[in-house]
Amino acid sequence: MLHTKTFMLMAGLMALFLGLGNLLGGEQGLVMALVMGSAMNAIMYFFSDKLVLRMYGAQVVSKEEAPELYRMVDRLRQRAGLPMPVVAVTNQDQPNAFATGRSPSKAVVAVTTGLLRALPAEEIEGVIAHELAHIKNRDMLISTIAAGIAGAIGYLPYLLMFGQRNDDEGGAHPAAALGLALIGPIVAMILQFAVSRQREFEADRVGAEILGRSVPLASALRRLDALAHQIPMHIPPAAAPLAQVNPLSAMGGGMMKMFSTHPPTEERVAKLLAMR
């Protein structure tokens, strides 16, 4: 059911992208939107891990550079039945983590230096188990492609310069085109919001199963959420949905809060504690 809903959301996102291309630029705009969307999907498919690591300023670490972290990831990935992912660390004070990569064999698990300093070992294990659950559920390709298409929608206004038809040729009115250009990114964010909330609950459940208990992950989520409201993380908003808790919480509410891609931490903790 989860995968069916995700597929429908992704299909809706691509349909929105193509529809806006057609309305903004006619047939030429539709073609350009198709080419742009396909190119963005290809880029996100083959280079998503490198792009996300760059957005977070994360560096790949070896077994020798981070032996305890490496052993922890290795032990948990064996319990999850996964190949060993690449391990990365980003020099961010806010405790957080994310996973990326197009498949389990190309996966990356990254944590912040703040996470390694602030959390006890069993809670770090819970955080890593959650990220391994994303890999096991094959969430990362879906979320990165969603982010790529949503970002590409922001470039659709440029179609006006190349493909918009004149009014006497039946083209879209400039005011309508401008309205669509403003609405498009908002709708894309709403679709990403729906994808992300479902996958976070499922990753919590599977992560607790990998770990063999739910309390350490529940405790870690409480701690991560509290510290995320106190310690800012300076990353592009497009990268925020990949983090375990909303990394932009300390940067205020308003539109940022409205379009948060993470479910409330209290709900996630309650579901985890109900598993005991």
Image: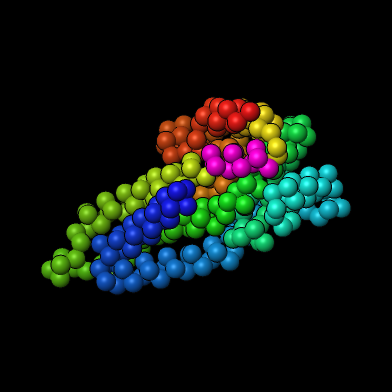
| Residue 126 at x, y percent in the picture | 69, 37
| Residue 32 at x, y percent in the picture | 36, 70
In which image quadrant can residue 50 be found?
Answer: bottom right
Report whether 20 appears left or right of 76. Answer: left
In which image quadrant can residue 24 be found?
Answer: bottom left
Report whether residue 4 is seen. Answer: yes
Instruction: In this rendered view, identify the residue nearer to me: 231 or 258.
Output: 258
Report whether 267 appears left or right of 222. Answer: left
Range covered by the magenta-colored residues: 200-210
Which residue: 60% across, 31% down? Answer: 275
Instruction: In this rendered view, identify the residue nearer to me: 231 or 195.
Output: 195
| Residue 150 at x, y percent in the picture | 43, 54
Instruction: In this rendered view, identify the residue nearer to me: 173 or 66.
Output: 66
Report whether 266 appears left or right of 132. Answer: left
Is residue 103 inside the magenta stretch? no
Report whether 121 appears left or right of 50. Answer: right
Overall secondary structure of the magenta stretch?
helix
Report whether residue 127 is seen. Answer: no
| Residue 92 at x, y percent in the picture | 69, 41
Which residue: 51% across, 55% down? Answer: 142
Task: In the rendered view, tell whether residue 274 sits above or below residue 101.
Answer: above
Which residue: 58% across, 66% down? Answer: 46
Where's the C terminus, which quadrant?
top right
Which residue: 72% across, 58% down? Answer: 83
